Image (cartoon, rainbow, N blue to C red):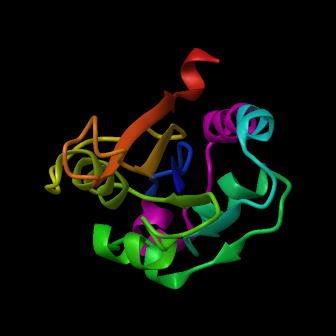
Amino acid sequence: MDLILWRHADAEDGEDAARDDMKRKLTARGERQAARMAMWLHRQMPHGVRILVSPAERAQRTAARLERKFTTVDSIGPGASPQDLLAVSGWPDGRRTVLLVGHQPALGELASLLLTGRAAPWTIRKGAVWWLRNRAGDGERDGEGRTQTYVVCVQSPEVM
């Protein structure tokens, strides 16, 4: 199973946004970040990807740049835990690639958990993608036939 973690692009943090975190909009920079990353994802993602998005305005706007159908999932909004993200993604047993568009710190903690076995405060930059893959071990390489999780790629809009 592939799991793609996409942190929302750069968002405003003004006085109005502080009153309602869910309504924070993307900045002009964030719009450019989301557009660049969406273009890259279009070229890379397989067909049939399940796209699950936080209800926060900044995540919704980031995902909208993909111009694909997506599902809004309340449980992956700001304040979500890595376990919340795992629960909605179906990791590691799902058959389809899943793209989660969400927030820090949950995305970074989830990446850490899946790659090291423990949630740590890793940072995923605004607008960046971490693409992880899980596959069954072959017994010879891992000695036990366990599943293996590895990084397919990490992509940041600043280098595109």
- Give left or right: position of 13 versus 84: right
Q: Which residue is at a point 69% across and 76% down the rendered structure image?
A: 71
Regarding residue 20, the answer to whether it shows in the image is: no
Instruction: Tally the numbered discs.
Output: 0
**Is 26 within the magenta?**
yes
Percent position of residue 39, x then y: 78, 34
The quarter of the picture where the C terminus appears is top right
Residue at far right of view:
67
At horizontal 32% and vertical 61% (from top left) the residue drawn is 106
Is 143 on the left or on the right of 63, as rendered? Answer: left
**Residue 37 % position (x, y):** 67, 35
Percent position of residue 97, x then y = 62, 57
Q: Nearer the viewer, residue 52 or 28?
A: 52
Among all residues in the image, which is located at the extreme top? Answer: 159
Q: Is residue 90 magenta?
A: no
| Residue displayed at 40% across by 66% down | 18
Q: Is residue 24 above or below residue 81?
A: above
Secondary structure mostly taken by the magenta-highlighted segment of the chain: helix
What residue occupies the far front of the structure in this picture? 140
Q: Choose top left, top right, bottom left or bottom right for residue 86.
A: bottom left
Name the one closer to the observer, 112 or 93: 93
Q: Nearer the viewer, residue 15 or 39?
A: 39
Confirm whether residue 117 shows in the render.
yes
Query: Which stretch did the figure color magenta?
Result: 15-37
* Residue in the image at 57% along x and 80% along y: 73
Image-based side of 99 in relation to 108, left or right: right
What x and y, as percent, mark residue 30? 62, 40
Residue closer to the observer: 21 or 156: 156
